[in-house]
Image (spheres, rainbow, N blue to C red):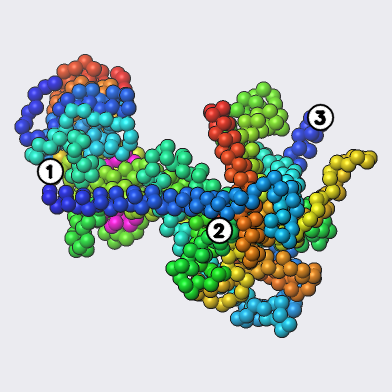
Amino acid sequence: MSAVTSKDLKAEAKGLNFFYGSVHALKNISLPIERRKVTALIGPSGCGKTTFLRCFNRMHDLYPHNRYEGEILLYPDNVNIISPEIDPIEVRMQISMVFQKPNPFPKTIYENVAYGLRVRGTRKKQVIDERVEKSLRGAALWEEVKDRLHNLAFDLSGGQQQRLCIARALATDPRILLFDEPTSALDPIATSKIEELIIELKNEVTIIIVTHNMQQAARVSDYTSFMYIGEIIEYDRTDKIFTAPSSKLTEDYITGRFG
Amino acid sequence: MEDIKKRIAHIKFWNGLFQVVGLLSTFVGLVLLFTLMADLFTDGAPRLSYKFFTSFPSRFAEEAGILSAWVGSCLVLLVTACAAIPLGVAAGIYLEEYASKNRLTDLIEINIANLAGVPSIVYGLLALGLFVYFFEFGESILTGGLALALLILPMVIMATRESIRAIPNSIREASYAMGATKWQTVKWHVLPYSTGGVLTGIIIGLSRAIGETAPIITVGALTFIAFLPTPPVSSDFPFISFKWLFDPFTVMPIQMFNWVSRPQKEFQLNAAAAGIVLMGMTLLMNGVAIYIRYKFRKKIKW
Amino acid sequence: MKKVTPQKVRERVIEAILFLSALSSILITVSIVFILCYESWGFFKEVSVIEFLTEKDWMPLFANPKFGILPLVMGTLLTTGIALIVALPLGILVAVYLSEYAPHKIREIIKPVLELLAAVPTVVYGYFALLFLTPILQKFLPDLSGFNALSPGVIMGIMIIPYVSSVSEDAMIAVPMHIREGSYAMGATKLQTAFKVVIPSAFSGIAAAFIIGISRAIGETMVVSIAAGGMPNLTLNPLESVQTLTAYIVQVSLGDVPHGTVEYRTIFAAGMTLFLMTLGFNIVGFWLRKRIREVY
């Protein structure tokens, strides 16, 4: 693994292992996450990239028989967010996630964005109004929905729904934003909008994105990590990975020889 | 950061509280069920004896028994089973295996869902108008059995359909590919593989029928019967008689209802004893149904 | 031209028999409607519809009979209302608990046991309401009469919990996991997820469950016949004795009312009212359940 170019880290996985029951899904993973940069996780299906991503906001705690070992440190507090002493809810309140399929709640557009604030007990309408507008603007959706904030979110198109989910995730000022193949259910135009958005968002928030689309990783990310059967094979600057990978396996994958 | 910790403690408190409340609510029903059985048992158990099962009702509470009631229940249930099972299973097979998607089948479907929600006493009124007076079956075992058959028919149809639907299409295709006709496929594959579910549905339907009171009251079952129906088998030619179908009758729940409604404490104890027997019959049938479902689910896995 | 073989004939005959069996369900509905209409028609020839709907007394067996259905409808609504106050909150709590909190194994055990509540013969519940619950309630409510609407209402409520909880739970389980994950990922607890996301998502299913419960309570007969008394009473006081539509039909059926008289026909008029009330709820419920199937 090549050297990290910057010391400005937001988070770092150190010796992370993860088990689904007796299945050893992530093997001794170490990975730095640069502050306000986009880190892409790529690799063939089943390589563990989504599993790894879901460790960052402890989604695995929702299901029985899952077990973490090792650490994911969140900087600057230096807290191990996968330690059993840390409440998963506390982690999720700081690290938001956007899913593969748009999953808006059966509520209005406004209430979808306000959801995280309400979960945190915010009551003041003025505060919520401001945050909803700011987040929708941040997700490049404001202009399209400002006149129908109180319509049901299901009325939006797939791409709009996904941007709504991004707005929902942004509303609580997350320290890290996780994207799990956010465009796999979208058409090319909606996809390019989301990609532009991700590039813009990194000015404000640290991003980790899982994608099976290598062009996408090349377009949006600053750093890329190639994973294979639960291990990180290579991590480097994205331009380096795509032009001069140091591992043969990485090269085979990005040139489309397997996967 | 401190704020967030406080907030988390707060929402987690409510979450924990709800978990307890939810668990308690779940147990309210169960606790009631056990209280009910315990109450019934303490009141009625002393009355349970061989004599209680072999005596007719009587003006004297200590001498009264449930002979005519349980015999009546069994005979009524026999009629119900004979009418509801073939009709319900056949209808279920038609709707799942034969029916094409059209207005008529849609109508039949809505209609069955609706019939399942019709109050049981309305079936009683139907039976009163149709079987008692129109077909002139009178206030007989036949009428009672048919009334209950109509009542459980939607349940049997729905259970049949559900278990047939669980059979994967590949099985049917395999059978057709061997040149089997539709009916052969149904007879050799669909029916045998869905037996578990169908049987479960039938037993649960019959257990509902045995506890039903309202429709039997409207068709005019008597509350005081001190004789048994004509025996179905006789020593004279032709040895088998269907005269019992047209005999007046009473059933277990009606006997219990009659005793509950009396002001004397002694009769209410009889009611409790009859209740124990009735509960025993229903729980037994439900137990058998659960066992069959479990057994068949283990045997066939798609 | 295709050859007609005996096998083909047999196939057609079997199909025809099966079809007729399926059609029999329609025949049942038609007969119900016909019988109710026919006998009610006879009733309304002698009693005006206006009197039936507006008269405040129901005294059909008196020398000077009065035929106002309102007291019976009110009795039905009162006991049903009490049952719903018990069954809806408890049913929904049970459903949320089983679908969102309970471990899979516990759910598999509790569900069938809970469904036994619906399998207990209603006459046994009637016994329980009259001889167990009413005496207990009378200790707290000295005004409670021996026959009252409260006790059977509560018992009916507990009786219909499984109807409400089971259908609601099915609807909640059908809410896809990724919707829940969206909520958990925002830092929500199970409670917040259940009430803010799962219940709204499963709304039509839960509404259907409520309607099934309502229509059960309206049509329930034995509990109210045994424990609510036999006094047609235009009241909303749960401590008093009331008579429901169903209990009235039972009362008349137990007596010796000759076929073809107005008194005989009253039970069909009452039955018609009952049928229409439940029919309305059933249709709405069926439509709602159909809707959930379409959403996901």
- Residue C269: image quadrant is bottom right
Return the disc, 2 or 3, that comes first in the chain's sequence.
3
Q: Label 1 is found on which chain of the structure?
A: A
> Circles 1 and 2: CB distance less than 8 Å?
no
Q: Which mark is residue C128?
A: 2
Give the residue type that dot 3 points to. Thr
Marks 2 and 3: which is nearer the front? 2
Identify the residue at image location x=36%, y=44%.
C101
Vertical position of residue A36 compared to residue B245: above or below = above
Vertical position of residue A169 compared to residue C267: above or below = above
The residues colored magenta run: A98-115
Marks 1 and 2: which is nearer the front? 2
Give the residue type that dot 1 points to. Asn
Q: Which mark is residue A174?
A: none
Residue at numbered disc 1: A203
Q: Residues within 10 Å of mark 2 (few under 14, many from 20)?
A: many
Q: Which residue appears farthest toward the left when viewing the image?
A: A7
What is the x, y in percent for residue A89? 23, 44
Q: Which mark is residue C5?
A: 3
Is C128 within the magenta? no
Whole-Å distance between the Cαs marked 1 and 2?
69 Å
